[in-house]
Amino acid sequence: MRGSIRDSRALAKPYRDLVWLAYLTLPAWTDEHRRVVLAHRLAAATLSRHQEEDPVRLRALLLRSALRARPRPWTGLLAAVEVVPAVTGSGDIGFTRALEAVPAPARAAYALLRLEERAAEEVAQVLAGAGVPDPAGALAALAEMEERFGVTATLHSPAADPCLARLYGRLDVEAPRRLLAALVFCAVAVAAVVPWLGSGRPSSAAAPAATPETAAPGAWRTTTSLDLATWPPRGDLLSDRALIGRAMRAWGRRHPQLLYAGRLGATAVVLLRRSSQVARYLETKGRPTLEVLPEPGGSSPLKLTATPRGSRYLLPPWVTEAAMAPFDGRWRPSVIADGVIGPVPVLREDGCWRGPLVRLRAPEVPPGLPYTMVDLGRLAPARVSYRGEGSLASAWRRLGCALPRPVSEVREASAWAFRSVRLPEGARGQWFCVRLTDPSGAGAVQAVLLATSGGRTTATRTGVTHGTWDCSRLAPDIAASVWWSAPSGRHYRVYAASAGVTVDGDTATNADGEAVTVLR
């Protein structure tokens, strides 16, 4: 049986807005049925209980509930009807995936800012009222995501509409299976409760069995696709089925691939993978946390924990040599234990991100040369490179204070020092072109001017461009322009270009007379 509910435009606008806000805020890893049903429940409950509240307060109350919601995997187990939001913009699937990859407060900001067209100040007020600790950071994360889509970002919208849903009736033959599943769940629950009643404490031995998928040892040797699907499970808690079961239930995905289960200090860590996502489940002193992030490339280590002592990483199974360094450039060999290295120390300076750097080598994977990764604060370090005078570590240490920490996953980070210049009032400047590439291959490019005067260095950034070859081997010609503030406080418009490029006003051409994009 199949049908659809009425068009979302027929629903009352306040209710429709609350459904959208709840749907976009709820965990993106939740399956569509549970997510859309819970969104409608939250919207209906909020309106019925707080209909006299002003719009800002009403949305803050709903958002607080949506941020705290943790859908249970057994929700809807016995439902006779499955509810799935209708796809209304199949061309926006890429935009939808990018939106779901940002933190929940940023998705909520999108619902308020773009779908309801509220002012940024009002959006920040709603976020703060819901208990979001950094409303400005949520708005910045949304802006960074939208920048990847350029001026067309406002033309995109989520591909599925939670207010225009399709209903799928399940065949009667499924009823016995659902009933059996419910009975099994109840039996397991009883088995877990009885020992607890007798002993005065919960029994981990009574936890449901966890059956994740796993890759065979050495699977990466049998394929040319060196990705996470070939990583075997590692860690000293692989036999702890209760821990792994809790991680699987927290994520709610069926049959994920187990990558890691182990104890690092006081924290138990489980890494799971499914459908281009990686879930990192942590238990510290009995307190569980779950983070779901886009899947990085298979050559990247995965961050297991980050503590004041440093970060620990799970390496690809083909990596057999590793060294680590903060941004001071002093490399130290790292011991690899069951695929894990660390803790890797981090230099901490106010307003700057400081790595660390990790140098890896896989002798059995041609060409077998070392490659360097930089930790930008995400799940996986990014492959890092540098072209210009000085060392890679020195260049990225300077850029670490010039660039904001990325809010989404970065696969590759490259920098090119393309011009040293004299600036007004006796200052010296060095121009960098920086390219950050996400897991899909899309690049974000901007130029950075580091100006030094009187022993003090300041950074001035251009705007970010997306969807170009700039600052890559496919586009070797670079030009940039910014308004620079001199030590006197006076502002100058300054230009720079790579070798062979001529700048005339706001246009730039290469040696062949071809136009070159000016980063500004």
Image (cartoon, rainbow, N blue to C red):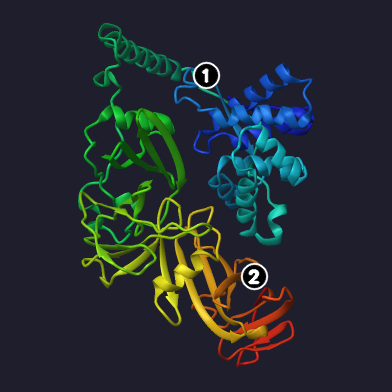
Residue, disc 1: 79
Location of residue 258 in the rendering, given as x and y in whole percent from the top left corner:
31, 41
Count the labels in the image: 2
Residue 247 lies in quadrant: top left
Q: In this view, does 438 lie above or below 414?
A: above
Task: Tell me which numbered mark, 1 or 2, is placed earlier along the sequence.
Answer: 1
Residue type of the residue flagged with mark 1:
Ala
Checking the image for residue 271, the label placed there is none
Location of residue 174 in the rendering, given as x and y in whole percent from the top left corner:
44, 20
Check disc 2 and report its element: helix, strand or loop. Answer: loop
Residue drawn at point x = 21 percent, y = 66 percent: 364
Location of the N terminus (image quadrant): top right
Location of residue 424 in the rendering, given as x and y in whole percent from the top left corner:
67, 84
Residue 188 lies in quadrant: top left
Residue, disc 2: 462
Q: Is residue 344 above or below residue 179?
A: below
Check disc 1 and report its element: helix, strand or loop. Answer: loop
- Residue sitting farthest toward the top: 198
In the image: residue 274, left or right of residue 160: left
Location of the C terminus (image quadrant): bottom right
Residue type of the residue flagged with mark 2:
Thr
Residue 444 lies in quadrant: bottom right
